[in-house]
Amino acid sequence: MNKLVKSLLAAGLMLGMANSALAAEALKLGYLVKQPEEPWFQTEWAFADKAGKDLGFDVIKIAVPDGEKTLNAIDSLAANGAKGFVICTPDPKLGPAIMARAKSLDMKVITVDDQFVNAKGQPMTNVPLVMMAATKIGERQGQELYKEMTNRKWDPKVSGVLAITANELDTARRRVEGSLSALKAAGFPAGQIYSVPTKSNDIPGALDAANSMLVQHPEVKNWLVVGMNDNTVLGGIRATEGQGFKADNVIGIGINGVDAVNELSKSKPTGFFGSLLPSPDVHGYKSIQMLHDWVAKGAEPAKFTEVTDVVLITRENFKEELKKKGL
Ligand code: GLA
């Protein structure tokens, strides 16, 4: 074989290899979240993308604010060739419908943050779940509130707890129950804890709920505000402001951290004292990494992955603490 033929053959071989590499499209995985307006979920998406870059797959991100959009999103993922998805469902009760649809399309599912429940309202423990340690983080909220109230030397007799609840969401119920039990354990009078349910998990919903409770207790001079996340607590804080309470007479501590950045950046302190920052970065990266390993390598994910680390961020340290986590 002469040189020319040899090099032509070699070139042909290389072209062929390039062609087949192009033909093998990158793996696609979905990441569906209920509330894309929350920085919490934006952070999960950003770190899911990072996992995709590191491990070589494409992440299709879709907002799913309700059941109909969720089922449509699953269909559109399948049409795009995705092999599975991570989801924070807009409603835990959609669990069975989501699983049925995914199964019919041969897609794998990992849940993040909010656990599915079945028709009887029991948790669907057979679907892999990545979530924060809800009770523990709630207890920490209660402990930190009590600590700050002690720092301010409030008279417990004229202080109250305003707890904004969302009991149909298990993680929310556990966080708030943890917080209230820690407050009672620390010595806060149980009879001065007032709970009120919110209609929606956002600032306007929590504000309405808080307003309706505040007017019923004109005797309370100082308020501790409890809620399952930053927006819930922020709604409570806005309500106290609307009813004339000064920042010195209100202490609220949220959960999520990344959703509290605007509030903590304000030029003057508000009643929002701080937030417990868990690890949205870990939730986003780890959940989709587990899905990738399941789809690409057949590695079965753990049924339950609890993410436990949490730090209290305040006006003093939030920039530094967020930076430490690359947020
Ligand atoms: C729930 C809340 C979110 C966030 C996540 C964290 O989904 O709605 O704001 O706190 O839990 O797990």
Image: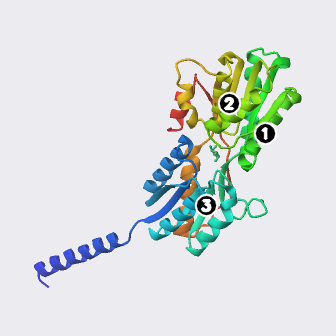
Q: Which mark is residue 277?
A: none
Q: Which mark is residue 178?
A: 1
Which marked residue is nearer to the observer: mark 2 or mark 1?
2
Q: Is residue 255 visible?
A: yes
Q: Position of residue 211 (x, y in %)?
A: 71, 30
Task: Specify whether 286 is left or right of 171.
Answer: left
| Residue wearing tag 2 | 236
Task: Specify whether 191 is left or right of 136.
Answer: right
Q: Amino acid at mark 2?
A: Gly
| Residue wearing tag 3 | 110
Please, what secondary structure does the residue beneath circle 1 have?
Answer: helix
Relative to 272, residue 132 above or below = below
Marks 2 and 1 sit apart, C-alpha to C-alpha, by: 18 Å
Q: What residue appears at the point 27 percent right and 76 percent down from the top-left corner?
A: 16
Please, what secondary structure does the residue beneath circle 2 have?
Answer: helix
Q: What residue appears at the point 78 percent right and 16 percent down from the top-left corner?
A: 154
